Image (spheres, grey):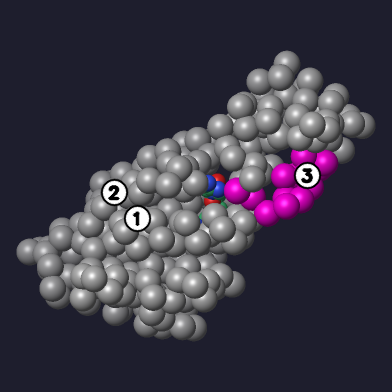
């Protein structure tokens, strides 16, 4: 075992992640960037820092899990979800169950909950819930706080800012309680193989799997398929695609916005 292998085992123990599930070289590049910051010259020395300095565990986790996100990121896909998908689901059942997987600091989950609230306000007979999960406890805490600077709303229509955010008077805004109460934030590792719940109607997992190996992505897509109800939807990130081997599980219902619909397995059709 060379010094990098040994470091990977230490990372697995400290961060409780599986390094082999990430693309080759991804961990190495992120570790090297931490080593440059700390001016540490070899993997063994960095392993010692990791073992002796608890804050470095958080720093490395932050370096590995890139948390960039925005409200209504890729606005068009949210238009499709609000205009077509939520109404379609709630035309055939009275309660919708949504999972925002890899929600980072909450902007995507709140965007989904805003769309849901706007639908529910005109359809009091319906109800819904958004499970929002991430592996990074740091960003989850920010999501739970639900407080954002003005610049976070660059892509949000001013009417929505007015309707769903409360100005705090110091340049920051807090999400309204009525939107927040539609969401349950939870810690969850997508590589655990277990979904946060089952009988889900819509899973949004966007811009999360870009560093996962092809095998890990396939496992995840199959897990989403199992977690969805019949006719459930899976929304991917703009640059992501469905592996050819999994084309029996989903069909594209909006290829441009990467919205897929669950196909039933052969035996259950
Ligand atoms: C780039 S952000 C994407 C946020 C949001 N989905 C969006 O598209 O704006 C990726 C998020 O995925 C999370 N993530 C990475 N690996 C994960 C895993 N194994 N399980 C759960 N979340 C993970 C990261 O912590 C990060 O917050």
C-beta proximity under 8 Å, tags 3 and 2: no
Q: Check disc 2: other Cα within 10 Å, few if <14, some if 14-19, many if 20+.
A: few
Q: Earlier in the sequence, mark 3 or mark 2?
A: 3
Cβ of mark 1 under 8 Å from ligand 1: the answer is: no
C-beta proximity under 8 Å, tags 1 and 2: yes
Using the image, tell me which numbered label, if any, was put on residue 197: 2
Quote the CA–CA distance across marks 1 and 2. 8 Å
Residue range in magenta is 21-34
Percent across and percent down for residue 171 are 52, 48
Query: Which residue carries the number 1 mark?
Result: 99
Residue found at x 62% / y 56%: 213
Give the quadrant of residue 34. Answer: top right
Observer-side mark, 1 or 2, equals: 2
Magenta segment: does it hold 170? no
Instruction: Decide: is 17 above or below 263.
Output: above
Q: Quadrant of the C terminus?
A: bottom left
Instruction: Count up the numbered dots.
Output: 3
- Give the overall secondary structure of the magenta segment: helix
Residue 97 in view: no
Instruction: Decide: is 45 above or below 207.
Output: above
Instruction: Decide: is 221 above or below 183.
Output: below
Percent across and percent down for residue 158 are 43, 68
Using the image, tell me which numbered label, if any, was put on residue 28: 3
Q: Earlier in the sequence, mark 3 or mark 1?
A: 3
Residue found at x 46% / y 56%: 220
């Amino acid at each position: 075992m060379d010094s990098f292998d040994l470091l990977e085992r230490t990372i697995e123990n400290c961060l409780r992640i599986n390094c082999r599930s990430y693309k080759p070289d991804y961990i190495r590049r992120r570790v090297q960037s931490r080593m440059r910051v700390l001016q540490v010259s070899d993997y063994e020395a960095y392993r010692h820092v990791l073992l002796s300095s608890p804050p470095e565990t958080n720093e490395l986790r932050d370096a590995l899990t890139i948390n960039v996100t925005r409200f209504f990121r890729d606005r068009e896909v949210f238009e499709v979800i609000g205009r077509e998908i939520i109404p379609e689901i709630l035309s055939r059942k009275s309660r919708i169950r949504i999972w925002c997987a890899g929600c980072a600091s909450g902007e995507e989950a709140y965007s989904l909950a805003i769309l849901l609230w706007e639908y529910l306000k005109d359809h009091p007979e319906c109800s819904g819930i958004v499970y929002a999960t991430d592996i990074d406890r740091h960003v989850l805490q920010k999501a739970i706080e639900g407080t954002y600077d003005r610049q976070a709303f660059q892509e949000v229509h001013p009417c929505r800012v007015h309707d769903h955010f409360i100005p705090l008077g110091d340049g920051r805004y807090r999400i309204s309680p009525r939107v927040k109460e539609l969401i349950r934030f939870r810690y969850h590792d997508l590589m655990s193989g277990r979904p946060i719940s089952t009988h889900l109607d819509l899973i949004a997992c966007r811009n999360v799997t870009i560093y996962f190996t092809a095998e890990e992505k396939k496992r995840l897509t199959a897990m989403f398929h199992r977690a969805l109800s019949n006719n459930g939807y899976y929304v991917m990130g703009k640059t992501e695609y469905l592996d050819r081997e999994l084309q029996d599980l989903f069909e594209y219902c909006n290829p441009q916005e990467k919205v897929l619909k669950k196909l039933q397995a052969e035996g259950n059709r």
